[in-house]
Amino acid sequence: MKAEQYKLEISKILNVHQDNIFLYWKGRVALYAVLKAMGISENDEVVLPGFTCVVVPNAIKYLKAKPVYVDIDKDSLNVPLENIKKAITTKTKVIICQNTFGLSSNIEEIVKIANENNIMTIEDCTHGFGGLYNEKSNGSYCDAAFYSTQWNKPFSTGIGGFALINNSILLKEINENNKELIKPKFTAVLNLRLLLLAKKYVLNSHTYWFLRKVYRILSKLNIVVGSSSGEELEDVIMPENYFQNMSKVQINEGLKNIKEINRLIELRKKNAVLYTELLLKHNRYHVSMQLHENHSFLKYPVLVKDRDVFMEIAEKEKIEIGDWFCSPIHPIKNNFEKWDVDVEKIPNAVFCSRKIINFPTDVKKIDKYLLFIEKNIDLFI
Ligand SMILES: *Cc1c(COP(=O)(O)O)cnc(C)c1O
């Protein structure tokens, strides 16, 4: 079976047993499955970074639990241990830590505190698959981890994700719950197959900007399978057909693309050094060299004075930059109360979400980006 083969390939990179890997339609579904296996329900609190994707608190809210956001520090863009400690109450059942842009938090210390308080831990490795933290694979420290293979993630299957279960007590639960998984609709799979073909044959540096626009419009209108359906961005009600299995199309794509992961991480890390050296030379915000060893640099984050102005200039010069996390719960811009976000409590996350952009790291020709930075250095913080 192809699914077993795919799990085996994933497990080799994570250095775990393949039976501990579970495949899903998206990474967020993997998170939901893990939370459910942990028995999360009404009145439970889940501590998470106040600098994440809205689909993370969504999975918590779908189980009627409460997300408790913790502020980040500006250097690592991750949550310091002290802030996590302060957020823990008698209702805390789970702490979610995140590999932001490919860098983990002080995971050993967080797990220690969690264990002392009888709290489960989940690592959001959607940016960190294949990367290491203190020489162990991202995802190996917590009770469970989840990964994404969406377009922009460490390697891609268009959309897709999987979970890793390290705590054997959870295995029985997740296997039981997975009996409820829905087979993805034929139309959704066909849609994904067409997008993957379009990416392979039509997408190139000439068509990128036009196709990006078309994709974003169609995805907003729910005409193509986008990363998030409109309803996931408007409210915290679980969409129909949310709990979906991974399709064969995704498995085949995954088997093909996972082979590239080590080469990609090497390239990303190499390019990141060049970004850091340049920004350091100009005394701008950068990822400190001390953090490089544990960072897999899915993207390179920088801070800019005025993001709208910056994005406009970059687009004119055909420089592809990303805008995660443009909000503490990307990409939500209002109605924060629906997700229990209190912006007063996460000032660093609010600041960074206004100023952050990211540069690509998996490009062969980095010079274009370095020259652009050098030329526009005054726009950087
Ligand atoms: C992409 C992402 C997710 C969700 O992954 P999907 O596969 O799109 O569901 C979760 N958390 C973070 C931080 C992400 O960037």
Image: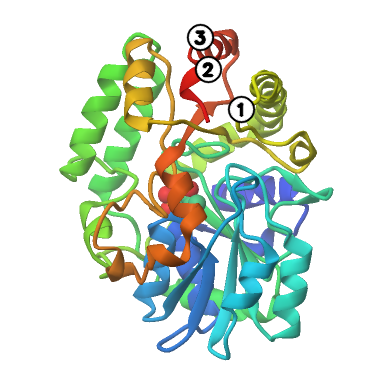
Instruction: Identify the residue under disc 3.
Output: 375
Distance between the Cα atoms at labels 1 and 2?
8 Å
Above or below 239: residue 261: above
Indicate left or right for 39 with 86 as reference.
left
Look at the image and name its color scheme: rainbow
Residue 152 locus on image (x, y percent): 47, 36
**Residue 334 in view (yes/no):** yes
Query: Does the residue tagged 1 have its C-beta within 8 Å of any atom of ligand 1?
Result: no
Disc ID at residue 284: 1
Mark 1–mark 2 CB contact (< 8 Å): yes
Residue at left 71%, top 32%?
262
Query: Mark 3 and 1 residues: CB-CB less than 8 Å, in contact?
Result: no
Quarter of the figure with residue 281: top right
Residue depicted at 42% across the width and 72% down the height: 60
- In the rendered structure, find residue 39 and report the number of the disc placed on it: none
Residue at image position (59%, 8%) is 367
Percent x, y of residue 200 = 41, 21
Residue 377 - label:
2
